[in-house]
Amino acid sequence: MGQILARITARRQELNLSEQALAVQAGMSKDGIRNWRRRHEAGEENAGANVSSISKVAATLGVSELWLLHGIGEDVHPTIAIAGKVGAGAQVPVFDVYPKGAGPQVECPPGLSPHGVVAVQIEGDSMEPVFSAGDLLFYTRHTHEGVPADVVGHRCVVEDEDGMGWVKQVKAGDEPGLFHLISLNPGANTMWNKRLRWAARVRLHWPAELARKV
């Protein structure tokens, strides 16, 4: 366990990630990693760590479980599938152009767990200066259909009733079931009172120059 904690510390410092932030992003309490260390120092063999929590910490750090547990193999980064492309302006956006999971893969950004996460690529320059062409947006759909209440007011990847994909700030519409889609670019048109198949909050924006496709 001491060697696992040492590898966690080394990788965490490479990512400039605090111990508390790592624990929270891995689905633990903010003192989760610290508690492992305390229990290890107290002589507990496994320090309260289990396979599930180790797996989540490895994913959050962007390393393989084998490397984290035993220091074997390379410090391999997991990948995330790119589902397609989205737009925000007048051009027709392309969305879900690849079969599920069959699109290009991009290396998972540090600090982001790949579990349940999908990426889309920005098409065109209609989202300047917030997002640029080629940038990647990562999101998680917690429901197959519908618009969860906690995404309203935030930047989201959405699919409208016509099957078009967009990146907009979602606002409540004038009637239940309708939504205003606010453009990120002040010069682009806002879409009023649209019905949506689903909406998912953008978890991370990754500039094109940092993305590593595999």
Image (spheres, rainbow, N blue to C red):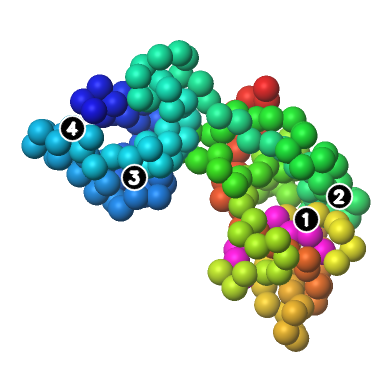
Residue at the bottom extreme? 175
Identify residue for label 3: 23
**Disc 2 to disc 1: CB gap under 8 Å:** yes
Mark 3 / mark 1, whichever is N-terminal: 3
Look at the numbered disc 3 and give the secondary structure of its residue: helix
Left or right of residue 3, residue 139 in this image = right
Mark 4 / mark 3, whichever is N-terminal: 3
Q: CA distance from mark 2 to mark 4?
A: 54 Å
Identify residue for label 4: 45
Residue type, label 3: Ala
Residue type, label 2: Pro
Q: CA distance from mark 3 to mark 2?
A: 37 Å
Identify residue for label 1: 166
Q: Nearer the viewer, mark 3 or mark 2?
A: 3
Q: Nearer the viewer, mark 3 or mark 1?
A: 3
Tag on residue 93? 2
Q: Nearer the viewer, mark 2 or mark 4?
A: 4
Residue type, label 1: Trp
> Could you tell me which residue is drawn at 85 percent across and 57 percent down?
164
User: What segment is highlighted magenta in the picture?
Assistant: 151-160
Residue type, label 4: Glu
Considering the whole magenta stretch, tell me its main secondary structure. strand
Mark 1 / mark 4, whichever is N-terminal: 4
